[in-house]
């Protein structure tokens, strides 16, 4: 397609960015370059075909961009956060029906997001605890991801005060890092539950304590022989549909002894209704919903828990997710090798974590840490 034929689409997309005070360069098939928006461009959008540029210009929608990006038709160069901010402005109003049908198709496999490749995750998560949840900046003294994650583990331990021999449940245990910390440091007898068979297999191999066991199960199917003294729920509640949050806290209450201590860490939303951006994440990555912290605390109280403390820490998660983004970008080739060259999965990881970091930075989503006691 000639530059002249592209002109209406260049004008359209440039006008879209001008209204939002943004600017970028646009490169098509490595040849034609245009300035879009107004001002000094801080990043470049690169398209591998003019038809993909025209599609985005005609329908500047987040769904359109996601489909183009995940299928390798567009990429970004230069300042990555500027690239993310431009992408984040794309509209979320409903697309034409024919286009919705086309863009809804994706190569998302039936495997859980956490089963893609443990070795790939190890390239950007902290060593040695492999925590895929928010770290803790610890009053601004933290300078590395590893320090942030250890600070988080210490914070949990300070609040729960685990003792040797106490029964501990880690609901949504990931690759077993928190369970490992509790059993090795305090001598707890810990059960970790996860829906990911790969996570459980890794944890069984890499958590040396005989006082730790890992089960592949949903929370509702886990029925221990006796109640727990301690429970940690870190980054797991988001995957439970909001309509089942009451069920979750009732289930939890039945599995914690009276006086037992609980730590909950979860992403929360300012508004309870599911947004179009959340629906997009559900389509390509994993099912999740974000509740308001007020609703979460109310349900926990109704289930018999007393709130000890509540902390909001969106900055901690903005830091954590951006550290993951930087590591993913820096180790792209190695991660792709672990993913057997699956560029689509690599782009999912990088794309959703980039926008997550931006959302947390701008306080459109939040991170709450709560300590409870079972009454």
Image: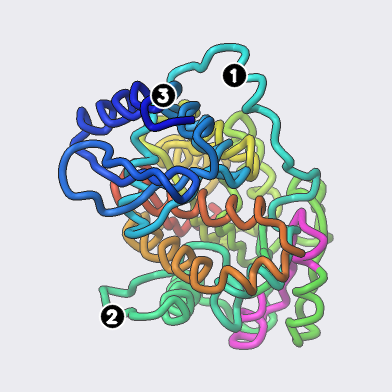
Residue with the mark numbered 1? 99
Q: Give the range drawn in magenta.
A: 178-200
Disc 2 or 3, which lies upstream in sequence? 3
**Label 2 to label 3: alpha-carbon separation:** 55 Å
Residue at 20 percent of width and 28 percent of height? 19
Counting from the top left corner in percent of width and height, residue 350 is at 53, 56
Residue at 47 percent of width and 75 percent of height? 149
Where 80 falls versus 37 (above or below)? below
Asked where in the image residue 107 lies, by quadrant, the reply is top right
> Residue 5: which numbered mark, if any?
3
Judged from the image, the secondary structure of the residue bearing numbered disc 1 is: helix
Judged from the image, the secondary structure of the residue bearing numbered disc 3 is: helix
**Label 2 to label 1: alpha-carbon separation:** 48 Å
Asked where in the image residue 91 lies, by quadrant, the reply is top left
Q: Answer yes or no: is residue 239 visible.
A: no
**Label 1 to label 3: alpha-carbon separation:** 22 Å
Disc 1 or 3, which lies upstream in sequence? 3
Dot 2, crowdedness within 10 Å: few (<14), some or many (≥20)? few
Q: Answer yes or no: is residue 209 visible.
A: yes
Dot 3, crowdedness within 10 Å: few (<14), some or many (≥20)? few
């Amino acid at each position: 397609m000639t530059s002249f034929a592209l002109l209406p689409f260049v004008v359209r997309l440039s006008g879209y960015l001008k209204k939002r005070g943004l600017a970028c360069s646009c490169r098509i098939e490595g040849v034609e370059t245009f300035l879009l928006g107004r001002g000094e461009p801080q990043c470049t959008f690169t398209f591998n075909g003019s038809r993909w540029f025209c599609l985005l210009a005609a329908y500047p929608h987040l769904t359109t961009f996601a489909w183009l990006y995940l299928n390798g038709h567009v990429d970004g160069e230069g300042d990555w956060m500027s690239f993310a901010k431009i992408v984040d402005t794309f509209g979320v109003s409903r697309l034409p029906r024919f286009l919705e049908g086309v863009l809804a198709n994706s190569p998302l496999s039936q495997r859980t997001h956490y089963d893609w490749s443990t070795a790939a995750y190890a390239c950007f998560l902290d060593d040695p605890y492999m925590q895929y949840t928010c770290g803790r900046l610890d009053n601004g003294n933290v300078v590395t991801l590893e320090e942030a994650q250890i600070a988080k583990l210490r914070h949990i331990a300070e609040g729960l005060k685990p003792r040797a021999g106490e029964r501990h449940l880690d609901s949504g245990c990931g690759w077993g890092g928190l369970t490992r910390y509790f059993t090795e440091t305090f001598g707890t007898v810990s059960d970790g539950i996860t829906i990911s068979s790969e996570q459980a297999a890794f944890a069984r191999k890499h958590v040396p304590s005989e006082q730790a066991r890992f089960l592949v199960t949903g929370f509702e199917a886990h029925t221990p022989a006796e109640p727990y003294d301690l429970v940690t729920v870190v980054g797991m509640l988001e995957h439970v549909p909001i309509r089942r949050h009451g069920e979750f806290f009732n289930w939890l209450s039945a599995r914690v002894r009276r006086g037992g201590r609980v730590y909950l860490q979860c992403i929360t939303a300012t508004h309870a209704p599911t947004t179009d951006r959340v629906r997009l994440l559900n389509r390509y990555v994993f099912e999740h919903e974000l509740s308001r912290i007020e609703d979460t605390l109310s349900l926990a109280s109704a289930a018999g828990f007393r709130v000890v403390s509540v902390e909001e820490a969106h900055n901690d998660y903005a830091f954590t997710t951006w550290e993951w983004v930087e590591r993913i970008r820096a180790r792209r080739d190695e991660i792709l090798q672990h993913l057997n060259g699956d560029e689509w999965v690599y782009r999912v990881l990088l794309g959703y974590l980039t926008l997550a970091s931006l959302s947390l930075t701008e306080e459109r989503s939040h991170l709450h840490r709560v300590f409870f006691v079972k009454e």
